[in-house]
Image (cartoon, grey):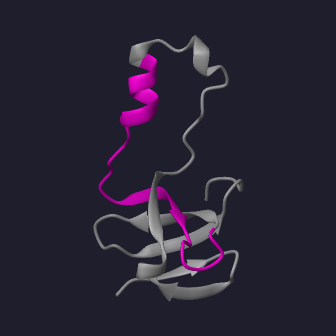
Amino acid sequence: MLLIHCPYCDEDRAEVEFVYGGEAHIARPLDPSALDDTQWESYLYLRRNPRGRHHERWRHTYGCGRFFNAVRDTVSDVIETTYRAGEARR
């Protein structure tokens, strides 16, 4: 079982309390109506899938309910650190 540290609750909890929210630090479109279909496809579907260190969004669904960011190694599945949403990439 993977233990994930929630930076808002400040405690380690079982992974079943969390939901994966995709890649972190995705730049949201400032003017969505100005995007063409190719740009929408890129924004909605195209994500990095690195081998190794990866920045991810998680939600503490069965806790505080808030989104936060985590740095996880996709090979070993070890979470290096977690930090609050809105904070700079670590």
How far across and down, in percent of the image, does residue 5 sit?
57, 80
Left-right relation of 54 to 58:
left
Q: Is residue 70 above or below residue 38?
A: below
Q: Residue at x 34, y 73 (%)?
A: 77
Q: Is residue 61 above or below residue 37?
A: below
Q: Is residue 46 above or below residue 62?
A: above
Quadrant that contains the N terminus: bottom left
Left-right relation of 53 to 84:
left
Which segment is the magenta one? Answer: 39-65
Q: How many marks?
A: 0
How far across and down, in percent of the image, does residue 90 sit?
61, 59
Q: Residue at x 69, y 53 (%)?
A: 88
Question: Is 50 contained in the magenta span?
Answer: yes
How far across and down, in percent of the image, does residue 4 sit?
50, 80
Q: Residue at x 38, y 25 (%)?
A: 41
Q: Which quadrant of the view contains residue 75?
A: bottom left
Question: Is 23 contained in the magenta span?
Answer: no
How far across and down, in percent of the image, does residue 56 sit?
48, 57
Q: Residue at x 61, y 77 (%)?
A: 6
